[in-house]
Amino acid sequence: MVQKFYNERRKQVLAAQPNQAHQLLAELEKDFDVEIITQNIDDLHERAGSTKVTHLHGVITRSQSDLRPDLTYPIEGTEIKTGDLCELGSQLRPHVVWFGEAVPMIEVAALICKQADIFVLIGTSLAVYPAAGLIDFVPSVVDKYIIDPRIPDVKRYKNVINIEKNAVEGVAELKVILSNGR
């Protein structure tokens, strides 16, 4: 039942296309060292052209070993089937972090945030942990752009610039701001 659920989600992801926000973030790589950290399990950032993407919760277009989550494989087609095995002989499952599992890329993401010169938060309520805590790793002197139609409570942080728009409109505005050297 779980495999069927994720096989259906995978088909939906593969049918989806990157939106303009994904494309604009990829375009920013021409002038900036952009590192994307995403909770989304799709590959839309990569398909839009982003080259440095850290997936906190895995990627639905890959499978992983039931025994060793670090053994991941591309999925041929759209389905993982019973009997699809990893090199250790265990059943493959979606490369997705499930509830109660550790978020293996959180330390990598925290390091990226610690080294940021500019931090941009797009489309989140800051309610899902541990990802919501990544903003705490960003140095206080760094500008923090928050893009969302409903800006979460970020009053305790310094240097916050709110862009109260959806991702597409907000990233377009961010690109203009950054291009003008704000």
Image (spheres, rainbow, N blue to C red):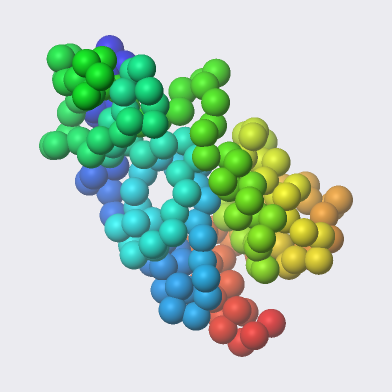
Of residues 105 and 46, the one nearer the viewer is 105
Q: Residue 54: image x %, image y %?
A: 47, 49
Tell me what residue is drawn at x 25 percent, y 35 percent: 73
Q: Residue 49: image x %, image y %?
A: 34, 65
Q: Is residue 129 left or right of residue 22?
A: right
Tell me what residue is drawn at x 65 percent, y 54 percent: 113
Location of residue 69 by image quarter = top left
Q: Is residue 144 left or right of residue 41?
A: right
State whether residue 100 is above or below residue 155.
above
Of residues 6 and 97, the one nearer the viewer is 97
Can residue 171 be seen in this snapshot? yes
Residue found at the far front of this picture: 88
Q: Is residue 146 left or right of residue 32?
A: right
Can residue 149 be seen in this snapshot? no
Image quarter (top left, top right, bottom left or bottom right) of the C terminus: bottom right
Q: Residue 131: image x %, image y %?
A: 62, 40
Of residues 145 and 103, the one nearer the viewer is 103
Image quarter (top left, top right, bottom left or bottom right) of the N terminus: top left
Q: Residue 66: image x %, image y %?
A: 34, 18
Count of numbered labels shown in the rendering? 0
Q: Is residue 110 left or right of residue 104?
A: right
Location of residue 174 by image quarter = bottom right
Tell me what residue is drawn at x 46 percent, y 23 percent: 98
